Amino acid sequence: MRRGQKCTLTATGGIRNDTCFQGTVPDYYVDAQSVEDIQKSLQFAQQYKLPVTVKNTGHDYRGGSAGVNTFAIWTHNFAPDPVITENFTPDECPSPVGPVVTYHAGQIGTHLYNSLQGTGYMIVAGSCPSVGPSGGWIAGAGHGIFTPSFGLGVDNVQQMKVVLPNGTYVTANRCQNKDIFFALRGGGGGTFGVVTETTTKLHPDQEYSYAFVQLPVPDVRTANEVLVANAERWSEEGWGGVYGVLDVAGSPNLVWLGYNANLNLDEGKASLKPVTDYLKSLPGSEHLITDFRTLPNQFTAQNDPALLSILLPEAGVSLTRSSRLVPKKNFQTADGQKALVDALMANKFGWGAVIASPTNYTLAESDQPGGPGESSVSPAWRDSVWHLTYTTTWDPADPDATSPEALASMFQEMSEAMDPIRAITPGAGAYQNEADVYEPDPIGSFWGEKNYARLLTIKKQLDPDNLLSCWNCIGWNVNDERHECYLNVRGIGPSN
Ligand SMILES: Cc1cc2nc3c(=O)[nH]c(=O)nc-3n(C[C@H](O)[C@H](O)[C@H](O)COP(=O)(O)OP(=O)(O)OC[C@H]3O[C@@H](n4cnc5c(N)ncnc54)[C@H](O)[C@@H]3O)c2cc1C
């Protein structure tokens, strides 16, 4: 058992002076830069029965891109320039689907946004530019600042190519390999094969309204009430971004950061009037920060310094989080709003609501449940106003904070902090890519029972020996050696 084998890099101090162990870091990596590299790696792993993990950027909060004693396929350098096709016809489909961009396994958001600058097109990809849009991002659902109006990442995909665990290279879209297309868009990363490329819809670029508002708040309950009372309307108006009551330098601040493709600047200001009026009424309102602007294009929005400062922490920050997709109905009555505010008040971490659900997007007929383009994300995404997150950090160089006992207690506290919200959102979901490591109901929360049953069948067909696996992934085994570093929290964890 490898619990407590920590030698995490710190943000400023590099590695601390200590005896280091391998921890979850795989013993062997292949720097895969082509389809053939991936095929040969998987065939080699099959031959010698080596458990495989797949790593792209390593952003996975739940550790899915590493594993004890695994053979790792690293895709980060498989990144030729993205290619735009003006009128793309997916392989074996009867008709074209319009403009698309195709990018490989190792691209990050920055490459896509840079390559589309000046083309007149925009794309749905991560708010965070360092996430891998062809890796875990798309496998888990994929949200960004424009998903409320243009759909989740999975809704925009026209085609994916993947090397299956047996080494076969296949194309999946709405016309062929539909089960695989379903599984790759929501079933989770590192499970069904190694994706080599993704082809995604392009939209005409445009101007966007922008709002950034911030002020310390003396009375957190009233701040929560204002945000909860207006949440459903903001979502319906198409805002994407994040707001909440966050700890800033030791005091609670109301922070509101949003991007809108539907409202003009005056309409954007009017939309946020309840929050700006409230903040202007507070003592200290002379310190109120308000920044309302029109941004000329997506590139400017994705490179907004306020967005980047929230999303790009220094390397080496150790953090964990819990999250919940909070449905519309929780916002629709006075009793529902009060219950939500009470539950937020019970949490000591501060909170952020990512507004990312496709509330302003109509799912195409082909992508409705039962259709050829159905995705496997939790149906809760289609009915949620908030992707609510609580986050905490610790110093990776502090031996007290990083003992197995201290970490177990901290992960438990973080997981339990979301319980009051879980209690008032029965049957809702959670975003697997930004979830509690010890989520008490992963099947119901990440996929829903129906999607899970189909995903499990596909997994057993494609990978009967579980060559590819990760924590809480479809078909995983908690006692797999890969998970030996995980703790036992809330009764979830390896048994030995
Ligand atoms: C700072 C930060 C900001 C974030 N911002 C956003 C955001 O704006 N929107 C959002 O939706 N999410 C966001 N996330 C969450 C993010 O979507 C997940 O962490 C995602 O899993 C990252 O995918 P990756 O490929 O970059 O990372 P990795 O850790 O390399 O991989 C994640 C998972 O995908 C698998 N995987 C990677 N590549 C492949 C491949 N080619 N084929 C098959 N499986 C693969 C891995 O095995 C692993 O299970 C953020 C995370 C961080 C740390």
Image: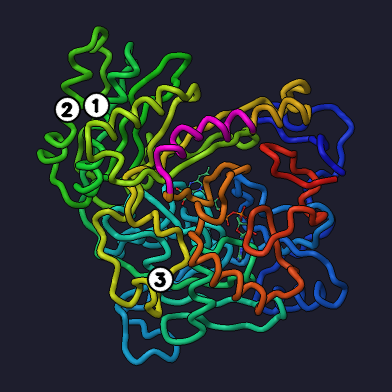
Residue nearer the viewer, 249 or 452: 452
Q: In the displayed structure, would residue 454 be above or below residue 146?
A: below
Q: Residue at x 74, y 27 (%)?
A: 402
77 left or right of 445 in image: right
Q: Where is residue 25 in the image (x, y as percent from the top left)?
A: 78, 49
Q: Nearer the viewer, mark 2 or mark 1?
A: 1
Residue sitting at x 52%, y 46%: 434
- The residue depicted at 53 percent of the width and 51 percent of the height is 433
Residue 275: mark in rendering = none
> Disc 1 marks which residue?
226
Does the numbered disc 3 mark a residue whose Cβ is under 8 Å from ligand 1? Answer: no
> Which numbered disc, 2 or 3, marks the residue that appears first in the sequence?
3
Left or right of 255 on screen, residue 269: left
Tag 2 and tag 1, C-beta contact below 8 Å: yes
Please tell me in which quadrant of the rendered image residue 474 appears.
bottom right
Magenta residue span: 412-426
Q: Which mark is residue 101?
A: 3
Q: Does the magenta stretch include residue 190?
A: no
Residue in the picture at 76% in, 64% down: 52
Which of the 4 quarters of the picture holds residue 74? bottom right
Q: What residue type is labelled 1?
A: Val
Q: What element carries label 2?
A: helix
User: Which disc is residue 274 wearing?
Assistant: 2
Left or right, 305 with reference to 445: left
Mark found first going from the N terminus, 2 or 1: 1
Circle 3: element type: strand
The kind of residue tagged 2 is: Pro
Q: Return the x and y of residue 220 as percentages of the image width and height.
A: 35, 18
Q: In which quarter of the image is residue 242?
A: top left
The C terminus appears in which quarter of the rendering?
top right
Quarter of the image with the N terminus is top right
* Majority secondary structure in the magenta region: helix
